[in-house]
């Protein structure tokens, strides 16, 4: 039943593609939220974590798909 095997392979590939897409969308949302949180932090809090307001401004200018941990530069 070669036809059934091929359908199963296509389904697995489709599931993999959808899973990858959902993971990417989730990561982009996480980046968006993290950048919003950074922008809302006080200068003192930023200093505590070793960032400046200029660092935050630079990060906020990045596109949502630019992930410092996963490429997309």
Image (cartoon, rainbow, N blue to C red):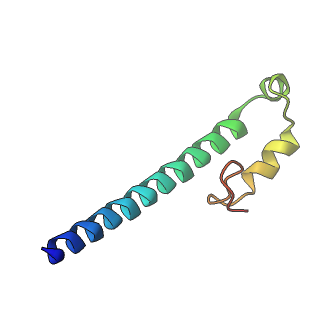
Residue 7 lies in quadrant:
bottom left
Q: Position of residue 40 (x, y in %)?
A: 69, 35
Q: Position of residue 60 (x, y in %)?
A: 73, 51
The quadrant in which the C terminus is found is bottom right
Up-down relation of residue 51 to residue 55 (above or below)? above
Q: Which residue is drawn at 44% across and 60% down?
A: 21
Up-down relation of residue 59 to residue 71 (above or below)? above
Position of 31 compared to 24: left or right? right
Front residue of 25/38: it is 25
Number of residue marks: 0
Q: Which residue is drawn at 70% across and 37% down?
A: 38
The quadrant in which the N terminus is found is bottom left
Q: Where is residue 62 in the image (x, y as percent from the top left)?
A: 73, 57
Up-down relation of residue 61 to residue 56 (above or below)? below
Up-down relation of residue 61 to residue 5 (above or below)? above
Q: Which residue is drawn at 62% across and 60% down?
A: 65
């Amino acid at each position: 039943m070669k036809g059934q095997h091929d359908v199963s392979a296509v389904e697995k590939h489709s599931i993999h593609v959808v899973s990858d897409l959902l993971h990417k969308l989730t990561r982009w949302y996480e980046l968006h939220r993290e950048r919003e949180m950074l922008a809302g932090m006080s200068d003192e809090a930023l200093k505590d974590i070793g960032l400046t307001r200029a660092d935050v401004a630079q990060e906020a200018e990045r596109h949502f798909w630019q992930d410092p941990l996963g490429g997309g530069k």
